[in-house]
Amino acid sequence: MKPKKKRGRPMSSHNVSVTPEFREEPDIEKLGRVLIAIALDNAKRKEAVNEAAVLTEPQATISFPENRKGDAMT
């Protein structure tokens, strides 16, 4: 039986290496935009983690005094 052809990109296409290139005059505006984008992304991730932590915390329970009067099943 012939093996099925897999869909999508092969796993080997994910192995990409980036080689930095030295420039005498780097584009400062591009570097600034990249750094700002990274800072904004980090802030969003921190905010999402904090919101998730707040949602998973147990809700505060209301405590009643021991000598309260109410419907006692005796």
Image (cartoon, rainbow, N blue to C red):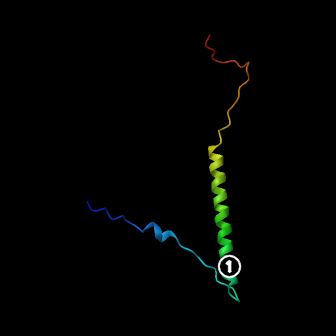
Residue at (63, 56) in percent of width and height? 48
Q: Which amino acid does label 1 sit on?
A: Leu
Q: Quadrant of the C terminus?
A: top right
From what the image shows, is residue 11 above or below residue 23? above
Residue 6 point in image, percent of width and height? 36, 64
Residue at (46, 66) in percent of width and height? 11
Give 43 or 14, whichever is nearer the viewer: 14
Residue 7 point in image, percent of width and height? 37, 65
Q: How many marks?
A: 1
Q: Neighbour class for label 1 at 10 Å: few (<14), some, many (≥20)? A: few
From what the image shows, is residue 70 above or below residue 53? above
Residue 65 point in image, percent of width and height? 74, 23
Horizontally, is 2 left or right of 70 in the view? left
**Residue behind mark 1:** 31
Residue that lies at the very extreme toward the left in this rendered image: 1
**Helix, strand or loop under label 1:** helix
Residue 56 point in image, percent of width and height? 62, 44
From what the image shows, is residue 62 above or below residue 12? above
Give 15 or 70, whichever is nearer the viewer: 15
Tell me which corner region of the image, top left, top right, bottom left or bottom right, holds residue 61: top right
Residue at (31, 62) in percent of width and height? 4
